[in-house]
Image: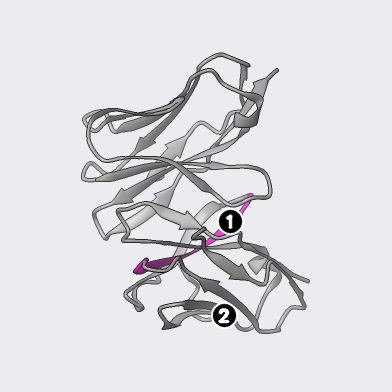
Amino acid sequence: QKEVEQNSGPLSVPEGAIASLNCTYSDRVSQSFFWYRQYSGKSPELIMSIYSNGDKEDGRFTAQLNKASQYVSLLIRDSQPSDSATYLCAVNIETGNQFYFGTGTSLTVIP
Amino acid sequence: DARVTQTPRHKVTEMGQEVTMRCQPILGHNTVFWYRQTMMQGLELLAYFRNRAPLDDSGMPKDRFSAEMPDATLATLKIQPSEPRDSAVYFCASGFGVGYEQYFGPGTRLTVT
């Protein structure tokens, strides 16, 4: 089992819809969780960080963390074609103080 | 505009040659990470430094890869000798620790023929 798992997609949503991206992790003592966006041929760009259970909102983005169920999700409201990218989930595994990325979910927003 | 810089942006070399990649972290960040990204493996953490000291290089092939941080403004990743399987995009990132936000450089696209 990988430390961080994501559905690779592709996920397609119409413009204006809500895109929902999910990520599960294996280590129960993980503390820090991050979402990155990566456009093709570019480097990962930090979108959100979340450290405690619940929701965290930043503009059109909402990160949701549920440590009991070991998942973290990213909601993108009012999706725009410019949101089309690969979204990477990342987790700081406290055991061994390691940092792992998921393989990413490809999102396409259809105009 | 604070950002991580990496050089070179592209490198094509022949198998067996030495490759050196350089990274300048964001001023003030005390932790520097090296990643490798391929289509097959995704984004893999190779090594990271905190306050210039290597903390973990367990993700790095030890026989041919080496990472150093000669000063707070420069991190290097060397491959000697390079092999075709090393072809990938190598990213440097910096931040305030493993559990905190990391900011990525533009990457070095390495092709070993």
User: Against B36, is B16 above or below?
Assistant: below
Q: Which stretch appears magenta?
A: B29-39
Q: Which of the 4 quarters of the picture holds residue A98? A: bottom left
Chain identifier of the residue bearing label 2 in the image: B
Q: Does dot 2 land on a helix, a strand or a loop?
A: strand
Residue nearer the viewer, A47 or B90: A47
Q: Does dot 1 land on a helix, a strand or a loop?
A: strand
Dot 2 surroundings within 10 Å: few (below 14), some, or many (20 or more)?
some
Q: Which of the 4 quarters of the picture holds residue A110? A: top right
Provide the residue designation for mark 1.
Answer: B37
Total numbered circles: 2
User: What's the mark number on residue B78?
Assistant: 2
Chain identifier of the residue bearing label 1 in the image: B
Regarding residue A31, the answer to whether it shows in the image is yes
In the visual, does B8 lie left or right of B101? right
- Image colouring: one colour
User: What's the mark number on residue B28?
Assistant: none
Q: Amino acid at mark 2?
A: Lys
User: Against B70, is A107 above or below?
Assistant: above
Which residue: 29% across, 45% down? Answer: A32
Q: Which of the 4 quarters of the picture holds residue B68? A: bottom left
Q: Main secondary structure of the magenta part?
A: strand
Dot 1 surroundings within 10 Å: few (below 14), some, or many (20 or more)?
some
In the visual, does B7 lie left or right of A87? right
